[in-house]
Amino acid sequence: MKSAKLIWISLLLLIGFVEKSQSQIFIGTTEIDTSSIVTGIDTPWEILWGPDDHIWLTERSGTISRLNPESGELTELITIGDVNEQNEGGLLGMVLHPDFDNYPYVFVVYNYIGSSGIEERLVRYTYSNGELGSPVTLLEGIDGAGNHNGSRLVIDADQKLYMTTGDAANTSQSQDITSLNGKVLRMNLDGSVPEDNPFTGSYVWTWGHRNAQGLVISPLGLMYSSEHGPSNDDEVNIIEKGRNYGWPNVEGFCDEPTETQFCADSNVMEPIVAWTPTLAVAGTDFYSHFAIPEWQNSLLVTTLKDGSLVALKLSPDGRSVVSEEILFDYWWGRLRDICISPDGRVFLAVSNMDGRGTVLPGDDRIVEIVSLNVTEYCSKEENVSICPGETYNFYGQELGQPGIYTDTIISAVGCDTIVSLLLNFFDLGSIGLVDSVMMALNETITLKVNDGFISYKWNNDPSLDDNAITIVGSELGEGTFDYTIEVEDANGCIQNDTAKVIISPAVGIHTFVVLEFSVYPNPVSGTELNMDYNIATEGMLIIYSQDGREISRNILSPMNRHIKILLPETSGLYNLILSNNEGISHLKVLKL
């Protein structure tokens, strides 16, 4: 059995933090009330707050509806005919286009019967005149099963769509980069693959997942997933590009002898919290409202087996859990999902009709949690951006790291003020300077950085104030030289970067241009590179280390488009030079 390794800093179960007294319910000092706003629905899977101030929900059998939270009126929008509801499968996650007024698109994921049995597809519908229609399939043919299908959807600020997939009860798929199962997938809103995904032409954003059924992005831009473990180690993870989350080789933290080496070799990202025994974590959302101050800057996670709501108070930077509360322990039964209204009300989807719960009169239902004493506070939010390295004074606290911070200003007259600060760094943008350049003594090259900055300074010389500098090899002689650029942007933020210029008679670059080829590391072996290329004639690929040593030489054929290269070293800067028989060479700098 794996060690639970929970965050016990302030684990106050329902016993300690939710009190019932004379029909009153308290979370800390905040009095709340609960009520069922709709009953008689069947296995609600997704609930989300829409721009029309309605709750949009999916039922696993295939129905999508809008729910008026004030009146309880439920309006069916569509029942998808080819949804295959079997065991845990059916109609699952949903997300609305962030600019819904101009693009009334609804993205949903569901299981269906395909050529290989149960499969999974992602479909975009258009909302018009109170109905959903005009379906467009964005992705399909993903392996499905009776269990472990995922699947939550979320759209980030860059309008990229993320989708969780389960391992479809086949654990080998989670570590297989060519499989879409056991992954977090990332795509453009038209279903195409973004150019900046970790693997060229692949939807895979992260891998090594078992069955993530919660996905949310915080105001800081961090993405969190909640994921079912086997009989141990349910997890909450921070999702980061190109990371391996371990399954099935790792369960929970990297704390077993059989796991530590795999974690080190495979860049495994550990969870921020794990539970043994499992709670069967499902949907999750981020709470940042003043209505229930005790929940500010918290992840709220619903659980099925435990029938509880878990409140995870996060550190200001959002990267660790500082306290944990387990609330409403089986008050209503299995809790499948959660959404939060702009005024701080919390809604829970009760899922006792899913075949594993004890069905109560009126099930299934949507429950509302509302604060009764929110008017006792005056609330205020601040959004501030600073340059990296600067600090911001927040009521006597000098803050220098992005995060969510709160304070209560006590007033002798009138209401107390709860102040919330969302502190971020300005988006500095890329300088665009190469890491290193190799050139011959008889050559002249130009180093150039991106336009758009208000000032430039090379090598701390105010007279070198252009975004480009010319380097003459014969004037410097052989050796390695640092060229440093300092830039300032419109926000007054200053950045510095350095390029190493390596001058050697052994390497001549006849034409200094960037070759458009793709090089990426093998996710299993840190010493193996993969390169996709497209050339018209035979070429020679030579790889040099940062100090100018040749460490690899390969002939590239125009008949092929891919090569694997074994490197004797695993980290640092590499210069890749591709020369053809016409004497033209191309340079690409690779950093591992």
Image (cartoon, helix red, strand yellow):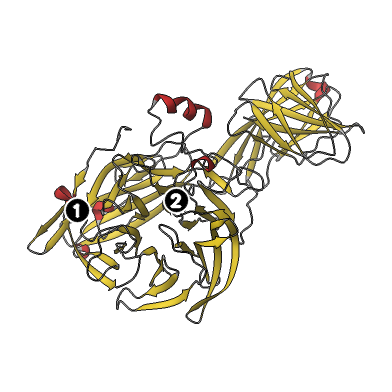
In depth, the one of 115 and 448 nearer the eye is 115
Q: Residue 554 location in percent, x, y? A: 79, 26
For residue 577, which quarter of the picture?
top right
- Seen from the viewer's position, the closer of residues 145 and 395 is 145
Rendered view: 276 above or below 26: above
Q: Which quadrant of the figure contains the N terminus?
A: top left
Q: Nearer the viewer, mark 2 or mark 1?
A: 2
Name which residue type carries label 2.
His
* Residue at 44% across, 48% down: 211
Please say if 106 is above or below 516. Answer: below
Q: Amino acid at mark 1?
A: Ile
Marks 2 and 1 sit apart, C-alpha to C-alpha, by 49 Å
Give the residue pinned by disc 2. Answer: 148
Which residue position holds label 1?
410
Q: Is residue 237 left or right of residue 466?
A: left
Q: Provide the secondary structure element on which disc 2 rests.
A: loop
Residue 487 lies left or right of residue 326; in this view the side is right
Marker count (numbered): 2
Q: Is residue 338 left or right of residue 249?
A: left
